[in-house]
Amino acid sequence: MLRFVFVLLLVLLSGCSDNSIVKIYDNSISDKKITCMRLVVFPPNEMIEITLKNKFTFEDSCDLRLEVFTKGNIHCNSNQNSQTKALGSMPSSYLRMKITKDNKTLYSYYIDIKDEIKDTHIKAGFSKMQKDLIIVR
């Protein structure tokens, strides 16, 4: 019985954690309705664009930009990370989503990903942004 409770507690705690990092650089963005954004994805990625365009209607003429940066197939050769690599917890990709205006970052979302970037990562990142900000479709 004690073993069951321990396993259940472990599952519940691990399911609620998120290793994403969010930073709000300009607090005024939290109070304003965001009704218009321009989408920029680098490097270009059709899956990311389609996923985000299903969540929000982007317009090229907007001052606010949602900038999405990704990197995959990350390999670290440093000996300082040998323990992390041995445990299999070294990320192989990352996702960064930023809202900017006039080249000034207002909000950022960052997450390390242990496998390739999937649409579920993009949806989770955008959902987090929607929880933190007032994003109106």
Image: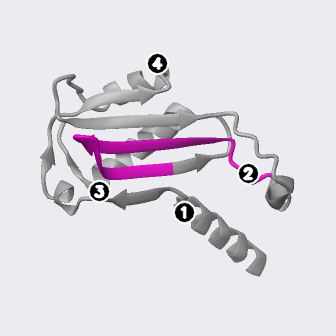
Q: Are marks 2 and 1 in contact (CB under 8 Å)?
A: no
Per the model, the C-alpha gap separating discs 3 and 1 is 17 Å
Q: Which mark is residue 46?
A: 4
- What residue would you read off at disc 1? 17
Q: Are marks 4 and 3 in contact (CB under 8 Å)?
A: no
Secondary structure type for disc 1: loop
- What residue would you read off at disc 2? 90
Please name which of the two marks, 3 or 2, marks the residue nearer to the observer. 2
Secondary structure type for disc 2: loop
- What residue lies at 76% left-to-right and 46% top-to-bottom? 76
Per the model, the C-alpha gap separating discs 4 and 2 is 26 Å
**Which one is earlier in the sequence, the residue at label 3 or at label 1?**
1
The total number of labels drawn is 4
Please name which of the two marks, 3 or 1, marks the residue nearer to the observer. 3
Question: Can residue 74 be found in the magenta stretch?
Answer: no
Q: Position of residue 129 (x, y in %)?
A: 33, 49
Secondary structure type for disc 3: helix
Q: Is residue 114 visible?
A: yes
Instruction: Specify start and end residues of the magenta stretch as a single range.
Output: 88-110
Q: Position of residue 37 (x, y in %)?
A: 22, 34
Type of amino acid at the residue the image marks with label 2: Met
- What residue would you read off at disc 3? 132
**Which one is earlier in the sequence, the residue at label 2 or at label 1?**
1
Q: Main secondary structure of the magenta part?
A: strand
Per the model, the C-alpha gap separating discs 2 and 1 is 17 Å
**Which one is earlier in the sequence, the residue at label 3 or at label 2?**
2
